Every structure is written in structure tokens, then in C-alpha cells.
Image (cartoon, rainbow, N blue to C red):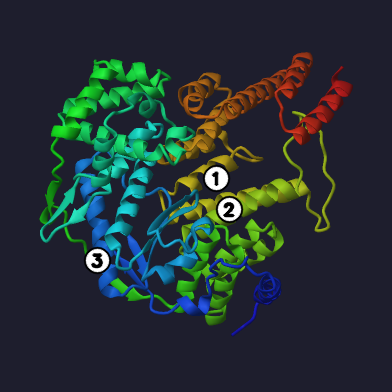
Amino acid sequence: MKLTKFTLLRRRIVRGCLVLACCLAWPAGQLVAEPMDIDAGWLEIEGEDLSLMTNAGRQRGLEIAAALHQFRAVFARLAPAIELSSPAPTTLLAFRDHRSYAPFKTVADRGNSRILGQFLSKPDGNYLTIDAGAELVGSLAVIYHEYVHYFVRNNFPGVPLWFNEGLAEFYSTLTQEEDAVLIGGAVERHLDHLRRRGELDLVSLLEADSRSESYHAPNKVGDFYAQSWLLVHYLLSGSGERLERAADFFSRVQEGEDAISGFEEAFDLRLSTLEEELQRHLVEGDFTAVRVPLADLGSGSWRVRPLSAADTNVHLADLLLHIDRRREAESFLQRALDLQPQHGDALAVMARSRDMGNRFDEAGILYQEALAIGSNRPQTYLHYGIHLLHVAHHRSPSEGGDPEGETRHGQTTDGDTPGARRQRLIEGAREVLREAIDLKGDYGEAWYMLGQSHSLEGGDPAAGLVALQKAHALLPARLEVVAALALTHARMGQRGDAEMLIDGLLRPRGELEMVVQVEDEVERLLLLRASRLAFENEDYATAIDLFDRAIDYTRDNDLRRRLEADLLRMQERYR
């Protein structure tokens, strides 16, 4: 095998760092994943709408794949407005038993046998993991619950917490009979809890958010989930008018109306009356599950193939990396590279790990070799694009300088200016981000980063706006995307559009500090744009005044110092 300079450098990088990693032990009592213990016997089961990896055997794997297919089909049937495709790659891992699964749970839950499944959602991708042992029904219920949250977040951001949790509980009841799927049946623990409790507290329920005591306190969270489920069951089991009124209520809350008055207005009844109706539903309601014939859902077709040990180690390493266990992840990656030295995906995930450890020079070498070998993972191109943007921002002069470009930079050792190198890095980032989108057209994070790249030198604000609008359509719950859209409108001088996004989407759902920061940045960008236009018209006094006012809205201290230095130079030249 021919050894390139990248291969030699990579081997020194990887092996040198693993020596240090092996000297650092995890605290006593914590389960540590070992590559040699886990990488045998894995299968990949692929269907039209999912890909599942498992070491639980062919039969169990197909059973899980069919159950997830049926869940998505039922959800699509009963909630046709929901978009089921994921704006991020999703990896499904089914471990054969608790012993196999335990080392791959989040750090806080490692070794906790009560955790049957987890749904980990990150901007670059999702991980869905379950214990495929004897308690499969319980494991799948956890995944159904978390999947509903994911679908709701991607489709209806800002819905009340009780609806999100109640709907997840409603769909988590999905079970399969010989010829049908049952959904929406009684959750006996909730019924028992509510019947013992004897009364409802809808005020606390409707006003609750993720910070509320009723959602976190151990002695109250049972009430919250049970009442959320009951209210959603009441809405879904009634006439279509109830759901229409619920939609009206959601709109009122998103527009800033008080939860209690909004509910009473939308449903045209007093809260006390609703409590009476829910009490009646609790006692007399029909909690029989809806029966959906399997023939109506389709069985799906599956392709089963064995996973190589190298591929298995890469997937497990990526999972470990996403739960912040970099040292263990790198041991799995080294195992993959020992088995297959030219494994592009192993090198790409190793590069991502080095980025996370702020070892950017090493990461750059690994990314380049990974792409030279080839990768079909959209995440590889997303991560490399993010890497290039980071290097461009931190290794070369940042934005600033007077509007006529009077600032000059010195030459680098290769005869190139730092500004030109920065520009090449940004262009390179855009290129690989487009590669990620070519591989996965609905990759929300890649569209977001592509849009952000156009806020830098050489960027096209109009192209950035298109990319960010696409990202927002795919990631409606991401307030960072809304903020980026508002700032792009400001760069284009479109104050009204920027303020509409802030007032309509950011202010109702964002933290006050974030809203104020975006408002300040919008004002700064608008003033700098107006200053630049005044310079172009040779109205230097107005331009300098606008530039000075823009500094007042600059929160970043380094940027403020650069702008103040630019202002001083402009004042010396034009006054």
C-alpha cells in the first residue's frame, strides 16, 4: 500500500494521542466501551424510510424495523400534516441486551437498567438507540414517545408543553396484534393516578413550560404527564371541531396571548367547565385503542447485510462522540483504522473528534485524507465546512476596516495575504457544504451553515438569504436560524423584514438576552450599510456619524476595538 504524506502524518497523530488517552482512566464504577468486546455480529437492515444497525440478530432486527415502519405509517395516517422526513441524518442502533447497551448510554445514565431507549438529537444528526432484549415493548414505547417530540419540534415549534408531552404519550401506546396495529389506548398508570388524585389542575397544566416546577418536581411530574395525556386524548377522541379549536389556541399562545384566556377564548368555555368535561371523560370516556389493519400500512421491504467490524466501530465511535466521550470514541476509530487503514469515514469522524478537542491542524489533515479516499456521509462534508469556516474566522483577520478598504494586510510566508487565504477557506467551506446538500437535499444544518457563510467576505447576501430560508423551512424550531435570517435582511437593508422575524418568531419564543442581542446586531448592520452608502455618495460627515453610531450597538469587544480604530482612521482622513 502506498503511504501518502497525509497517511504518515495521520498515523503519528492518531497513535501519539492514543498513548495519552490510554493513560487516562474513567472514574471507578463507570462502564467503558471496549472495541474488541462489541464489534462482532452486527447487521445493517435498510428499508425505504429507515436504516437500522443491530447485533440482536436478523429476526429481532427485522421485528424492530417493521415496528418502526408501522409507527411512521400510523403517524402519517393519523397526522397527515406532519412532515416525517428528518432534516438531519438519523442512525438507529438496537443493542442485543442491557449488557451490550449499557456502555453506550449517556454518561449520566450509563449502567442504569431502567433506561430502555434514548433519542439523541444534535444539529448534525440524530441517534436513536434501544435495548433490544426481552423488554422490547417498553423500549419501543420510549422511542415512539421521543420520535413524536422530534416530529412535533420539526413541524409545530412553540406548541404548549402539555400538548407536546400529551401527544407523545398518546402515540407511545402503539402495539401490534396479528393483523392490526393498536394506537391511542388507555395508559393505565395515568388513569390510575388521575382517579386516585380526584381533581385536576388545568391552570398549572396550561401555563407550564420547560422551566416550570410542575414539569420537574418529582412529586408533581406524574400529575403533569397524566393530565397532559388526558387532555390530548380528550381532544383527539372528540369531533374535528375540538382539534380546530386547539389549533386556534396554539395560534393565540404563539402570538403572545395568555394561556388561560387564550384557551377559554379558543374553546368558548370557562376553564372550570373544561375541568368538568375532563372529569367526565376520565370516568365515562372511551379509551379503546384505534385499530389500524396492517394491510393498510404496508409491510415494507428490507435489505439485510452484515456490517464489517471496521464499519461497526465507526458507527459506535460516532455515537460515543455525540455523547461527549471522545477518548473512548477514538479507541473505536483506531480499531477501525487498524482493520482498514484507508477507511474514509473513520478518518472523517476522527477529524471531527480533533475539531471538538480544538486540535484544528490535525483535524485539517485528517479531513483532507478522508475526502481523498472518499465518503458518502453528508456529515463529513458538513463538519469539514464548519472546520474551514472556523479556521477562516480564527486564523486570519476578522471583518472590519474602513468602508473604502484602506486597511492593508502584510504578506504571508507563501506570498499570499492573510485576507486572500481567508477568502479561499470560506470559498472552500461553501463548496463542501454544497456537497453535503447534494448528498442530502433536506440537510437543515448544511443549509444553515451555507447561509451563514455568505455573511462573511465574498458572500452574496441574496444567496445567503435563500439558503437560510431553506434552513428555516426545515428547522422551524431553531431560533439561531431565525436570528441569522433577521441579520441577513439587515445586511440587505431590509429593516421591515428583519423586525417582522424578531417580533413574530424570535420574541415570543426566545430568551430576552438573545432577542436584545439580535436587535442590537440588526441596528449595527443597518447603520454600517447606511454608512457605506454615504461614503459611496461622498457624504463623509454623515458616513462617519453613522459609523460612530454603529459602534454603540457592537457587543463584541474585539470587533468594537477594530471598529473604533477604523473610525479614528476615517476621522483623520476625511475631517
Of mark 1 and mark 2, the one earlier in the sequence is 2
x and y percent of residue 102 in the render? 46, 66
Dot in front, 3 or 1: 3
**In the rendered image, is residue 156 in sight?**
no
Circle 2 crowding by C-alpha within 10 Å: few under 14, some 14–19, many from 20? many
Q: Element under label 3?
A: helix
The residue type indicated by label 2 comes to Gly
The residue type indicated by label 3 comes to Glu
According to the image, label 3 marks what residue? 63
x and y percent of residue 139 in the render? 33, 59
Residue 77, located in which quarter of the rendered image? Answer: top left
| Residue nearest the observer in this picture, 342 or 264 | 264
Of mark 2 and mark 3, the one earlier in the sequence is 3
Dot in front, 2 or 3: 3
**In the rendered image, is residue 402 in sight?**
yes
Q: Element under label 1?
A: helix
According to the image, label 1 marks what residue? 449
| Residue nearest the observer in this picture, 471 or 544 | 471
Q: Element under label 2?
A: helix
Query: Do the residues bearing badges 2 and 3 touch, measured as CB atoms within 8 Å?
Result: no
